[in-house]
Amino acid sequence: MSEHNIPNGWIRSKISDISTKGLQRKPASNESFAYVDIGSIDRNLKKISDPQVISGENAPSRARKVIESGDILVSLTRPNLNAVALVDLKYHKQIASTGFEVIKPVLVDSRYIFALVRSKEFVDQISGVVQGALYPAAKSSDVQNFEFPLPPLAEQKVIADKLDTLLAQVENTKTRLEHIPQILKRFRQSVLAAAVSGRLTEEWRDLAGLPEWEIKVLGDVIGNIDQGWSPKCHNEPTSDESWGVIKTSSVLPMDFVEYENKKLPSNLDTKPNLRVLPSDILTTRAGPRSRCGITCYVSSLSKNLMICDKVYRYRVIEGKGSSKFLALQLNSPSVLEEIETLKTGISESGMNLTQKKFRELELNWPTPEEQTEIVRRVDQLFAHADRIEHRVNNALARANNLTQSILAKAFRGELTQQWRKENPELVSGENSAEALLKRIKAERAAMKPANKTPKRTPA
């Protein structure tokens, strides 16, 4: 960690100074065990989650590291993702992948070291020494050589207790915040359902003396459906005045993402008749089931872009209604269910939506005047939801920063400043970190790793 004055009674140490190496062994063929690999780590909760139970006979060659309660697992592959976990009693004497560095603290509170490996300084330092492009990985020595401030044992316990409480509060807050986007998603769906059923403007329609809605098919209200072009393009988005071809990923529900495009090679002529323009409706016509039949409305764009072969482009015929209203309708739950029945294909990964079937899609169609009012009300309600979502995202970012701020304070001794004043005898003399380090050194020297389990403070 960065150089700074550490509290009296603390000492700078390396992970290798306070831990011991664990056992590695090949599982017996008839042995059954929980195999903890990188995929078994919940990176958000920082815990082991549902590892596979396998037999030694079927174990991969990486299943070698014996883990014990109180060990800390640190993934060496892509350490920037911070796949770390504290081993609890449930996984005592199980086997982990050699893709982990297993830290086995000696006479040190495991929770303190677990907090350490979640800190930004640890992640940044280990991520900065990775090797390999395809599977960037750190080495065991990178973890073992990490230097950090070591408090006296009694203070470690106090820090760990405080972190357990504070970080649990942060996680509870984050969990509540993370549920809000799903609530907003359901809200938007309910708004769309009310909009396309007539409930959203029922009173307004009666007051305006407008007629009831009609049943139309899509082909009655739109003009030509254009299908795009998919030449071989550069694998980068267009810039400046150059042209590009959109990818299907540019079409999200009600949202056009213009940077999802590929630059057209200079030796190919553009096709202005396929140019994406504001007020266009775009619908994906082919792809995996979940990506076929997705519709967006192009409210604006700044690039010269053409539609690709797997996207339809169309508009509502002038005088018959609003293109934006139609896009809202094609994103409503009931209409999406109907679109689902129109898809054809022999596999989930290769579905199609033909023009003929698409044009036969039935719609509830109000007057142009009511469509304008519906769009106005939906825009207003969606804008309110967007503002809430923006505030939630900001709050989540602050919560994530708060976690690192709390950890940083812990390793500077700020969480226990008053405790040290009240308990000077627990951080000095034989209780100092310097004295603790000497005891750890003696304990490690006396250990016989092959048949003796290191002493540690229970997690």
Image (tube, rainbow, N blue to C red):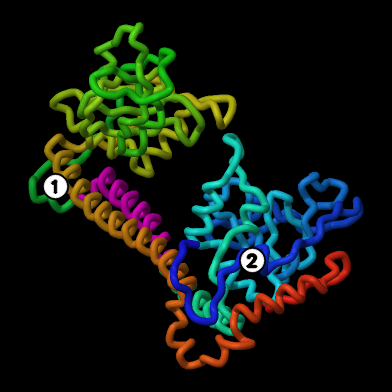
Task: Find out whether residue 181 is within the magenta segment.
Answer: yes
Residue drawn at point x = 34 percent, y = 33 percent: 295
Q: Quadrant of residue 73?
A: bottom right
Task: Inspect the image, locate mark 1, and give the three-letter code of the amino acid beneath it.
Answer: Arg
47 or 341: nearer the viewer: 47
* Pointer 2 local density, CA inside 10 Å: few below 14, some 14–19, many at least 20: many
Q: Which residue is mark 1?
A: 205
Q: Residue at x 70, y 67 (%)?
A: 19
Residue hosting label 2: 86
Q: CA distance from mark 2 to mark 1?
A: 61 Å
- Nearer to us in this view, 109 or 380: 109
- At x 52%, y 47%, the residue is 128
Which quarter of the image is occupied by the C terminus? bottom right
Foreground of the two, 15 or 365: 15
> Is residue 431 toward the left or the right of residue 288 in the image?
right
- Asked whether the beta carbons under mark 2 and mark 1 sit within 8 Å of each other, the answer is no
- Mark whose residue sits in front, 2 or 1: 2
* Displayed quadrant of residue 107: bottom right
| Residue 34 drawn at (x, y percent) | 76, 58
Q: Earlier in the sequence, mark 2 or mark 1?
A: 2
Range covered by the magenta-colored residues: 174-201
Q: Based on the picture, tell me whether residue 345 belongs to the magenta stretch.
A: no
- Side of 55 where 434 appears, left or right: left
How far across and down, in percent of the image, does residue 345 sit?
54, 25
Q: Secondary structure at mark 2?
A: strand
Q: Is residue 91 left or right of residue 171?
A: right
Residue that appears at 22% across and 50% down: 383
**Residue 173 spot, x, y in % from top left:** 41, 69
